[in-house]
Amino acid sequence: MKNSILRAISNVADFGDTDIFPFPVENFILFDKKEEVANYLVEKDKDFEQFIIDFPPSNYGTLAPVGYTGFRWATQIDPLWNVYFLGLVLEVAEKIEEARIPVEDQIVFSYRFNSDKKSSSLFRRDIGWKEFLQSSVSAAKDHSFVISCDISEFYPRLNHHRLDNALRQLGTGEHVRSKIMGFLSNFSETYSFGLPVGGPASRILAELTLNQIDRLLRSKNI
């Protein structure tokens, strides 16, 4: 667990806690005191149930612009809880990536986990939006029609039960799964829906829940 928390700290210190909000001042502490923060969170992890009661996660939510005319609800989590939550997700991130359609199949181009534990960057840089566009243009040359769709309000509406089942199917271990779901239940006002928008932990969990759809589409040759 400590190695995952240390990598989470390095990621936040180097890239920020979200891709939306300004960096909180606590990021300087994460950069300067990595070992101290990691040791503190590892100790708190031993009694997660009491930790979440004594120090319940807080977050700041607000509208953030999307494009020129749209908005979405985004979340900035308390810095310590943000690092802890990311550390928990990193404990299962490799298994999530292994369960997905392989990169080599050139089908799924969304966030792909970087398994290099020495890197503070959590996602591969050799596959993404650019490669998706290139593959789409190439595939379109051989077809008469192209279908484009978007999942409206995906992060806020993601069902916790579905995510919980996906984590159970991974065989990640009860101790990690229950803490991830415990944190999300505390975060969500409905206690059954929603991922925080803006941070890498949510992106990794979102890809897990979409994996079943990806595989279903591939099985139908779509």
Image (cartoon, grey):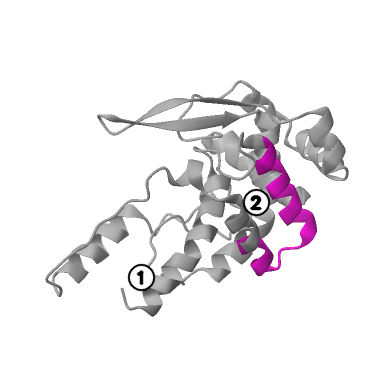
Q: Which mark is residue 106?
A: 1
Above or below for 101 versus 127: below
Q: Which residue is depicted at the point 87% across and 36% down?
A: 50
Q: Give the range drawn in magenta.
A: 166-186
Q: Is the magenta stretch mostly helix, strand or loop?
A: helix
Q: Distance between the residues labelled 2 and 1?
A: 25 Å
Measured as percent of width and height from the top left, residue 47 is found at 88, 42
Please identify the quadrant where the C terminus is shown. Answer: bottom left
Q: Which mark is residue 89?
A: 2
Measured as percent of width and height from the top left, residue 64 is found at 40, 27
Amino acid type, callout 2: Val
Above or below for 170 versus 129: below
Amino acid type, callout 1: Gln
Q: Which residue is depicted at the point 44% across and 47% down?
A: 154
Q: In this view, does 109 lie to the left or right of 194?
A: left
Instruction: Tell me if residue 32 can be seen.
Output: yes
Q: In this view, does 82 lie to the left or right of 196?
A: right
Under tag 2, what secondary structure? helix
Under tag 1, what secondary structure? loop
